[in-house]
Image (tube, rainbow, N blue to C red):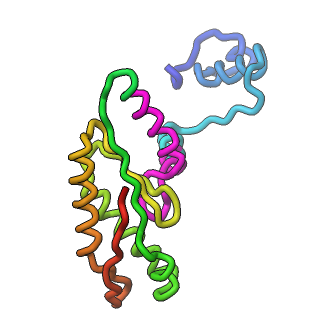
Amino acid sequence: TQGQELPGTGLGLALGRGVTMLAAACDYLTAVRPMLKDPVLLESSMLALKEDIALKDELTGLFNRRYFNQELPREIERFRRFGQPFALLLLDLDNFKGFNDAHGHSAGDSALAQLAALMQHGARGYDHVIRYGGEEFAIILPQASQEEALTMAERIRKASEQHVIEFGTATLGPITVSIG
C-alpha cells in the first residue's frame, strides 16, 4: 500500500531510511522514467472537495454549467444506446433584473438561493438541478416521460409562484418562473 515502507529499495538505501510506495512511484515517474514534470500530491479528501467546487455553484449549491455540459451528453448517449428516456427542463426567473434593481443584488442572491432550494426540494433524488447561469436553471430528469416532465415543471412553477421571498426582515413577494 502507499503508506507501507518498501524494504531494501535502492532509494531507501541511498536515503538511509524507509521509502513508501508513494515516494518510490513519484521518484520513478519524475527521475527514473520522467513522465511527470511537476507532480502534486493531494489528499483524496482535498481532491474530492476540489472536484465538488469545480462542479457546484457557490451561491446556490446546485450543479453548475460545467456539470451540465458533462451530464447532458451522457443522458443523450444513454438514450441512443439503451433507449432510456429523459427530459430537460429549462427555467428562467421572470423579471429578475427588475427584482435586483428594486431590492438590490444581495436580495437577488438570496432569492436565487431560495428558489434553487425550492427546485432541489421538488426534484427526485436522481434528477440533476443545475444553475445554468445568472437566473437561468436547468433540470435533467433521467428516465422521465413527457408527462412526468410536465408534472415536475408545473410543480416547480406553482411552488415558485406561492413562495414569498424574504430577505432580512423584508417580505419581497414571489418570483415566478418560465419553464420550457
Can residue 59 be found in the magenta stretch? yes
Q: Nearer the viewer, residue 80 or 11?
A: 80
**Is residue 129 visible from the viewing direction of this image?**
no
Q: Does residue 18 lie above or below 159 as drawn?
A: above
Q: Would you say the magenta stretch is mainly helix, strand or loop?
A: helix
Is 95 left, or right, of 35 in this rendering?
left
Residue 108 is one of the magenta-drawn residues: no
- The image quarter containing residue 18 is top right
Instruction: Give the mark count.
Output: 0
- Percent of width and height locating residue 6: 58, 14
26 relative to 92, above or below: above
Query: Which residue occupies 34% across, 90% down?
Result: 169
Residue name at image x 44 percent, y 76 percent: 95
Q: Which residues are magenta?
A: 51-78
Left or right, 76 with reference to 134: left
The C terminus - image quarter = bottom left
- Where residue 82 sits, quadrant-wise, is top left
Whether residue 153 can be seen here: yes
Residue at image x 36%, y 51%? Answer: 89
Q: Position of residue 57 (x, y in %)?
A: 48, 57
Q: Which residue appears at 32% of the width and 63% of the height?
A: 117
Q: Is residue 75 above or below residue 137?
A: above
The residue lying toward the viewer, choosing from 123 and 44, is 123
Q: Position of residue 147 (x, y in %)?
A: 21, 46
Nearest the camera: 39 or 121?
Answer: 121
Tell whether 124 sits left or right of 15. Answer: left
Q: In this picture, is 125 found above or below 134?
A: above
Instruction: Please state the horizontal and vertical placement of residue 48, each as a whole percent of the image.
Output: 48, 42
